[in-house]
Image (cartoon, rainbow, N blue to C red):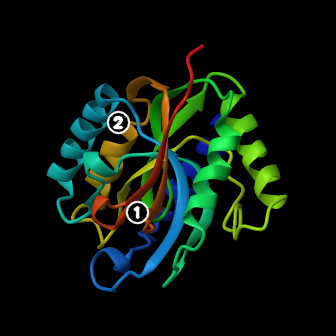
Amino acid sequence: MQEIYEQMWQNAMQKYRQEQFEFDDYLSERKDTRRGVTLLARPSSEIRAKITEFLSEFSELEPAQYCQPDSDLHITIMSIVSCKEDYVLQNEHRYCDAVNEILMGVRPFEVEFCGITASPSCVLLQGFLQDESLNNLRNTIRTEFLGNTLEHSMDTRYTIKTAHSSVIRYLTPPANSSKMVSFLKLNKDRYFGVSKITELELVLNDWYQRKSNTRLLARYNLPTV
């Protein structure tokens, strides 16, 4: 994972030096009707508090950018139906039952949040897995949905391999790009801690997992024994 994050960082820094930022007008101007179905995890309250502190520091420098609120912080386990315009969920109970079957026997796992990386459009927390639990779970989800008749569009944008969390999105050119980049570099290795994931959520969501546009379909507790 570190290689993936580092490559993203280097690519982003090259873009930033050339002032080549990408802006998200869905968060500022355009009406967003994109919806999908996602299995996700929430970082612990202790980790979220540290993330919020980091975002508050960033906002002091760049108040016009979008920082994800505490209620929306998450790790995507799998985007089962990738967000698309005017999506209407069908067979809700079948999705819930399918995921319930998949999660039987899946144990809690840990994600370590250490450092940040970036892209031309956003800043992300680097999440690191302690073992192969999440990768195995993702592969099981892929296999099970390929074998049933429920609509899915997994891995259509990219094959998810990390446990990152996108926490900042650019809405407008930075007020002071050099100060912003200096802040990001200063916090490149910032440590947020280890979160034990004991619960997963299946949700109908928008692109950003905003609470106002998210509906909980099912909550699953991962057995500890």
Query: Which circle, 1 or 2, is nearer the viewer?
Result: 1
User: Which corner quadrant holds the N terminus?
Assistant: top right
Q: Nearer the viewer, residue 222 or 155?
A: 222
Q: Is residue 3 visible?
A: no
Counting from the top left corner in percent of width and height, residue 97 is at 63, 51
> Where residue 208 is drawn, which disc sits there?
1
Residue displayed at 33% across by 51% down = 72
Q: Residues within 10 Å of mark 2 (few under 14, many from 20)?
A: few
Counting from the top left corner in percent of width and height, residue 191 is at 40, 25
How many discs appear? 2
Counting from the top left corner in percent of width and height, residue 133 is at 69, 29
User: Which corner quadrant holds the C terminus?
Assistant: top right
> Where residue 186 is drawn, which disc sits there?
2
Left or right of 152, for residue 125: left
Q: Is residue 119 visible?
A: yes
Q: Nearer the viewer, residue 191 or 133?
A: 133
- Three-letter code, disc 2: Leu
Residue displayed at 14% across by 50% down = 60
